[in-house]
Image (spheres, coloured by chain):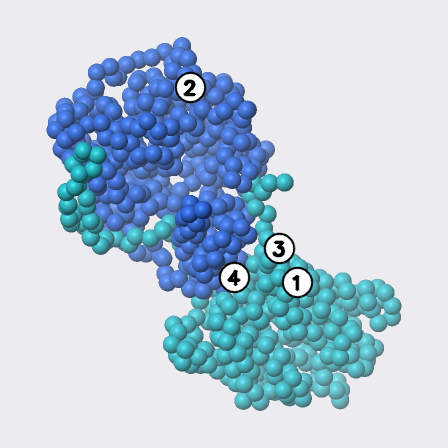
Amino acid sequence: MLKRFLGGIHPKDSKGYTFDKAIEFPPLPSKVIIPVSQHIGVHCDPIVKVGDIVKKGQVIAKSEAFMHSPIHASLSGEVINIAEMPHTSLVKCLSIVIKNDGLDKWIEGIPLHREWDKLENEEIKDIIKNAGIVGLGGATFPTHIKLSPSKDKNIDTFIVNAAECEPYLTADYRMMLEYTERIVTGVKIVMKLLDVNKCFVGIEDNKPEAVRVMKEAFKGTSVEVVSLPTKYPQGAEKMLIKVLTNREVPSGGLPMDVGVVVQNVGTTVAICDAVVSGIPLVERITTVSGDAIKNPKNLLLRIGTSFKEAIDYCGGFSKTPEKVIMGGPMMGFAQFTLEVPIIKGVSGILALSTDVVNSGEEGPCIRCGRCVKACPMGLVPSMLSILGERQRYKEAKDEYGLFNCIECGSCVYTCPAKRNIVQYIKYSKAQNLAQSAKK
Amino acid sequence: MSSENKVQENKVQGIKVKEIEMQESVFTVSASPHIRCEESISKIMWNVNLALAPAAIFAIYYFGAPALTNMIVGATSAVAIEYLVQKYRKKKITAFDGSAFLTGLLLAMSVSPSLPPYMMVIGSFIAIAIAKHSMGGLGFNIFNPAHIGRAALMVSWPVAMTTWTKLTTSVDVVSSATPLNILKQQGYEKLIETFGSNMEMYKAMFIGTRNGSMGETSTILLLIGGAYLLYKGYINWQVPVFMIGTVGLLTWIFGPAGLFTGDPLFHMMAGGLILGAFFMATDMVTIPITIKGQIIFAVGAGMITVLIRLAGGYPEGVCYSILLMNAVTPLIDRLVKPKRFGARG
């Protein structure tokens, strides 16, 4: 019996642009720009220098820190620059530029073939870590850390997040249709790692074909493919866990606190590739869409390909975009330049015209309560925005659960006064963190 | 599209690092989300005005030209006063977003049709300039502006506010009072007698062929407007249901001839209850933001209404009950918050 999560919104899903477009492989770019930070955690340090010749799959940046994920060359060629470059979420970041030599040669030893079920769990974790795999849904949390919960957490359930609740994005959907076998293998590997027998694959019911294909693929296993009602943010980790298991991740806690590990469906493909074929994360599926893109497509892109090249491959702009977004329209990051590279977490590139963005002018809160109804976390977003506006950050934290906010944007979407609630919340969080750092 | 990069060279960790300064972007860069729904403040406000239209049109038909005059004067003066206040305070002009119009219209609909128009203007001034803008304008006012305007007129010109132009029935009744007035001064028996029978009374109150403030008389047309607001999702059903329900329940219990002898149907349709419950007690700015809070608000307003009607000096208490509950709204919002996801304990 499916549970519901409270709140949420029903934006137009706009997936029609790329829903039926099979994944395409554009020609390789002449160069790639690979930032040393594409994950949550410590930035990596480059281990190559300008002039070095690198092969595809070679580690070019790593770190000794626990919370990191190594970075690999996504092309073979020459390192021509190591410099601060535009970055999709950090504004700018130290990046390694590799000039394509046109050979696209793997580093020695890749690809290979492993009998994954004969590997020890520790070996598999090392493979996943060394392959630079991070959460590909957009959060980019290092996967090997997520797959190593401490014993006392009693993990009993693995959830594959295939909800893809963000409008426009169809990358996960296409993978489910086209990379079905690799998903199945990836899921089995994770279940072995976590030593769990229970697994859910959660898919929103606006993707019936994916539900059908996945059900077929997992027939006869203990994996349960579940069709979820389409409601944003169904794919938010906490909401997904609630709906599938009726467990509520405690405030300030993690999914593992309720015995659950969640991975994006795309991540399971990457896990399969790494464990079975030894292939590190050098490419990903990205949806290039939006009303300002001429021919929206789902693309398999090398890490480091610039947004411009991806958009050009899709025929460029059909009209002037007001915003270019990395990720989905609800939680993605607006970009200031098309020179930014695709990094591991880029599930989509969206170009939206003014009509779609519909930002409007911010007005005063009229206390209509629509945000309160929409908030899946049970907060009062209007108060958080007002407290943020009035610089009462501590009150927001102590009395209105500022840090419970998952920044899903449902409140802003639904606000008739067009208040930038999430912006106030992000700023208030930063102010609180700065305050506690001072102490 | 490409941003010109100004490159500086410096050395970091022995590696050549070039620092880039980005020129201003051609794209809009702002925090997520990047799409918004179609609603806007003015869309909501004009829709509420639209929801009032059936009852307003009926008022013009039933009460005649004075009703039309007062509504026009009320709405336009409210808009004009808001415009002037914003102009004077050098604020952004939002006088035409429908909210001042709504306040003026609601004020007109909650006074006697025979009120002299200059009093309407004064009422509008008190509603807009004092109740709304002295508190900071839309979104910041604590009290329902239209009700503040009405209350001010009530204490300033009690006679004009309670003089009704038209008789309740076709019968030669001397009284020119509203049903609640008759009930208060002459009792329930007399009330029934005025209308002829129970059924006749209910019918008049349902359709609207009775005395009263010009917009409050027709239960059915107000319900149609209310249903439209519910359909659009601008109000929560809990507010009118709990407010009207509380009034019905309490007036039934505390009847004129002892417990459980009251006439809840009469009380639910009488006075400004339907208008107040659907259009004033749902004024988003001045009521609690959570549904739980709104239920408390509605029950409280219903209780105070009954208290005034049955035990107070005034025949009607909807206006004051809502104003009193407006006053405790910040308190309710402080105490009643939604249940947080993952709350411990």
Which chain does the residue under circle 3 lie in? B
Is mark 4 in CB contact (under 8 Å) with mark 1? no
Q: CA distance from mark 4 to mark 2?
A: 49 Å
Q: Position of residue A209 (x, y in %)?
A: 41, 32
Q: Residue at x 71, y 69 (%)?
A: B304
Check the rendered structure and report the hue given to chain B: cyan
Q: Amino acid at mark 2?
A: Ile
Q: Is residue B214 visible?
A: no
Q: Are marks 4 and 2 on the same chain?
A: yes
Find numbered disc 2 in the image and state the secondary structure of the residue it sits on: helix
Residue of label 4: A367
Which chain does the residue under circle 1 lie in? B
Q: Position of residue A355 (x, y in %)?
A: 32, 56
Residue of label 1: B298
Which mark is in front, 4 or 1? 4
Is mark 2 in CB contact (under 8 Å) with mark 1? no
Side of A200 where B179 appears, left or right: right
Q: Amino acid at mark 4?
A: Arg
Which mark is in front, 3 or 2? 3
Residue of label 3: B336
Q: Residue at x 52, y 85 (%)?
A: B121
Which mark is in front, 3 or 4? 3
Check the rendered structure and report the hue given to chain A: blue
Lower sequence index among marks 4 and 2: 2
Lower sequence index among marks 3 and 1: 1
Q: Residues within 10 Å of mark 2 (few under 14, many from 20)?
A: many
Find numbered disc 4 in the image and state the secondary structure of the residue it sits on: loop
